[in-house]
Amino acid sequence: MKLLPVEDARARMLAEVTALPAERVALADAIGRVLAEEVAAVRDQPPFRASAMDGWALRASDAPGALAIVGESAAGHGFEGAVAPGQAVRIFTGAAVPEGCDTVVIQEDAERDGEGVRVPASQAGANIRPAGGDFAAGALLLQRGERIDPWRLSLAAAAGRAELAVSRRPRVAVLSTGEEIVNAPATPGPFQIYNSGTLALAAMIAAWGGEPVTARPVRDDLQATITALRDAPADLLVTIGGASVGDHDLVRAAAGELGLELKVASIAIRPGKPTFFGTLGDGRLLLGLPGNPASAFVCAELFLRPILAACLGAPSQPRLITAKLETPLPANGPREHWMRARLGYADGAVTVQPYRDQDSSLVTVFAVADALLRRPPGAAAAAAGDVVEVAPLARA
């Protein structure tokens, strides 16, 4: 099988992905969803000149001096008249600045005396937020493809939106294969291990905007594998294990019975070489991940995550940053190597320390890693302090 470079493999996968249709949801239900429309402002925010402080609204030309108090302006209840020379209005933070006023003196600097107030000198515009100071009517506030977080949710709410058009979540079926896999709390046999990949991948899918559907592990049986793949209600099927070409690796053969058109047969990556991708006869996508947890999780970050982003109409390229190596690394082989690593921060720079043991079966290393360090194919030996590329992992 031809080993495709990582970028080429990802490009072939994304070429098969079509953004899913939009649906409208209440603003309160939009957290984590990807926008399928633009959000523009329908009016200025704030829609009027607003006070930035509690104090007194007046004319700067009247300060310093003793002024007559003629009313009050509070948030939601403005002073409706006009302020004449020699007059002042009690004002509170967020309230509309009355007509005729061009400055606000903070309450700590003023002295009230019955129906009057004495104020010091003040400059025009002091402590006043201009109308449209946050955004103006017609301004583009949020773009299609942006993921709604609490801050973007607040912006949409400030724009007066009660609903948003968002991309439908892709349904993703996660299927693990292999005689050696058993789900807790069942007691594993002497040659079996607990299923650690399915739940983790389902959690990743949910965090990345998909709707995971998990199935019971499938034995190394061709017909059982065919049935599981055929009956999975999903836009995308993700299998764990059985991705290679050994006697007990049946996923490709089962998918072939369902009309698999292979787009990526194998990838020049470490770990994760057997990863494959294609489309079934009914149009569903299939991503086959290796059974070893580290291999599956690395390839999920590099391939599954971009596929889900493309389904949602969001940016689909992995985010890479640069960091300084804390320890030297030997020259790399012909496959692109993604090493589990730990980020650090020293002297204002980001540093990275790869874990010594990169065995693809180790769950403990991935549990503490917060980055993947990229080593290009054929990379020369690297010294401590050299700059390398890393993909940060989202960790709580």
Image (cartoon, helix red, strand yellow):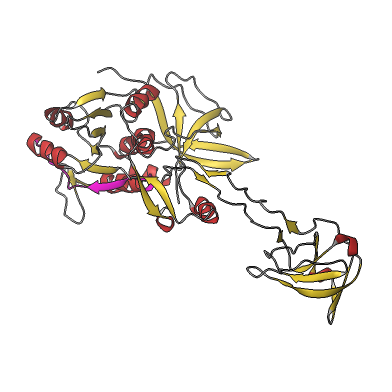
**Residue appearing at x 30%, y 42% in the figure:** 170
**Residue appearing at x 69%, y 63% in the figure:** 96
Foreground residue among 17 and 228: 17
Magenta-highlighted residues: 207-221
Horizontal side, residue 46 vs residue 34: left or right: right
**Residue appearing at x 27%, y 42% in the figure:** 172
Horizontal side, residue 162 vs residue 138: left or right: left
x and y, in percent, of residue 288 in the image: 25, 33
Residue 18 appears in which quarter of the rendering? top left
Residue 80 among those drawn in magenta: no
Horizontal side, residue 105 vs residue 229: left or right: right
Foreground residue among 326 and 7: 7
Q: Residue furthest left?
A: 223
x and y, in percent, of residue 3 in the image: 31, 19
x and y, in percent, of residue 14 in the image: 35, 29
* 31 relative to 107, above or below: above
Q: Quadrant of the N terminus?
A: top left
Question: Magenta segment, principal secondary structure?
Answer: loop
- Is residue 245 in view from this perspective? yes
